[in-house]
Image (cartoon, rainbow, N blue to C red):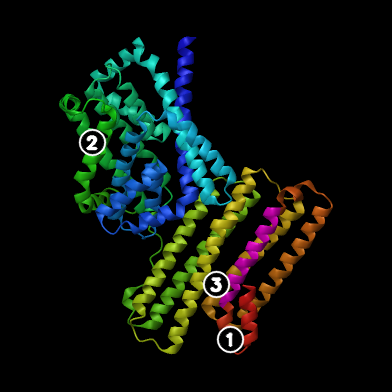
Amino acid sequence: MTSTIQLIDLLGAGALLLWALRMVKSGILSGFGASLRNGIARGTGNRVTAALSGMLATIAVQSSTATAVIAGSFVSRDLIGPRMAQAVLLGANLGTALTAAILVNDLHWLSPALVLAGVITHARSQLAKGRGIGKALIGLGLMLFALELLGAATGPLREAEVTTAILSALSQGPIFGLLLAAALAFASSSSLAVVLFVSMLADSTAVSPSLLLVLVAGANLGGAIPPCLAVTSDGPEARRLTRGNLAVRAAGSLLVLVTAGLAGPVMAAHVPAGVNLGIAAHLAFNAILLALFLPLLGPLDRLTRRLWPDPEGERGAPSHLDDAALDTPALALGGAAREVLRIGDTVAAMMELNLRSLLVDDPGAPREIGRLDDRVDAALYEVKQYFLRLGRSDLNEPEAARMREILSYAINLEHIGDIIDRDLSQMARKKAERQVKFSPAGEEEIGELYRKTLLNLELAQSVFLSRDVNLARRLTAEKVHVRQIEERSQKKHIERLQNGQPETLGSTSLHLDILRDLKRINAHVAAVALPILSEAGELSASRVITLQNAS
């Protein structure tokens, strides 16, 4: 019975530590996510500052996986180069080690103060940033409390005969120790938690310095696996990035496995008294990898491209942005128009996926929509860069006007993607989390407006490509029709509220917000018709202003 209670204490302390780590990560990302991403993007001017930005970001969010996902998103969108992104991950690894060095100190006395400050901040703040700070403070306090519980739970464990037997067996077969620590780090999605646990075991003489180095290396190896899984849908560049980081840690782990018998006693002899050997090993492991591979980012990038080339199925259709056509503006503009049509198809896929996730709860839909939105952002960036190169040529007025039309339509499509990703997708997530159900009539009204919006987007694609005046008139009329559908749905929704229908009462906020956002999307869709009608002399100046205000 005593051993069972000790095991429950150990598992509970470990679970609380992992939960607290996630609280810190989600709190910082919700409050400072945009600033953190901007900081990483701005800090990649050279490999040293890139590593520093990765280290600081990881210390802030307590998760190298979160930093790796951000870097993977950037590299897949060509916002930063793969070599600088790899430097970010090398710095993130060191940031995890520095975090462990801070947490291993006896700071349990600070835990209640942090929890109290976090609860007050979270309760009183009206802004997302303040609530994020509060959540992060609560997480830090719980982390310190969990470490105190973990230390108390490992006390009897360190003295148990079975622990001595296991550690003795692992000392005889260090590769099993490496794999065990890697499996624990992978299962918990946190190398930090495993390193802290190993460091506490290191207080016992049962753990030899050589085995300790192997366990720390294994924790680092296992901690590199979750980022690989987190970016599986982010494209080949992001996957190469995280797999390269895994390869770096694997190389370091193999080196430790070979040299642990010699390096362990040497390191134990030179670590100052009072310094935890496990934390020192963790710092040394990641600092050495940073020093070794930071100058070798070029060869590492070439190696990863050779090991993991772009799969044929993911290379996509060839881009229509052909630099060879830049000397012939008409051809270049035609290619850019076809590329923007592809953006429109991606936005339509986002909307269809969002509609399905509203009607049938799909937890994976927001992530897939976010991936498609990243693709839209990257495609718009490429179009802008292409036009910058084309702008150096001499364009006549019709060609310059067509370039402006193409760019304007592409920007409107990107805005639509943002509305779907940031607003409509989050509404679907809230509907699932709160277990809200639309009334049958409300669900039909929302579905009708979605389907009408998809038809209008398809019509806009035709208007954009053909510049047909009749189609442009029809698209403008459809915008008015959408407004009528939205007004009719609002009126019926209010009638259902007055009748006290339970589903309507629970879904009223979501229903009205969805109608508003679909109306905004249709305004962006219909904007493609304005220059065509204006050129045909069918749009007065006052009408243009009216339409723009409606948008």
Instruction: Please give the name of the residue rendered at 57% of the width and 48% of the height, measured from the top-left corner.
Output: 125
Looking at the image, residue 185 lies above or below residue 234: above
Image depth: mark 1 or mark 3 in front = 1
Which mark is first along the chain, 1 or 2? Answer: 2
According to the image, label 2 marks what residue?
A: 284
Question: Crowding near pointer 2: few (<14 within 10 Å), some, many (20+)?
Answer: some
* Residue 337, x across and y down, in percent: 46, 75
Determine whether the residue tagged by mark 2 lies in a helix, strand or loop: helix
* Residue 123, x across and y down, in percent: 59, 43
Spatial CA distance of label 1 from label 3 is 18 Å
Q: Which mark is drawn over residue 461?
A: 3
- The image quadrant where one finds the C terminus is bottom right
Image depth: mark 2 or mark 1 in front = 2
**Which region shows up in magenta?**
509-528
Front-lying residue, 415 or 88? 88
According to the image, label 1 marks what residue?
A: 534
Spatial CA distance of label 2 from label 3 is 57 Å
Along the horizontal axis of the image, is 357 left or right of 154?
right
Spatial CA distance of label 2 from label 1 is 67 Å
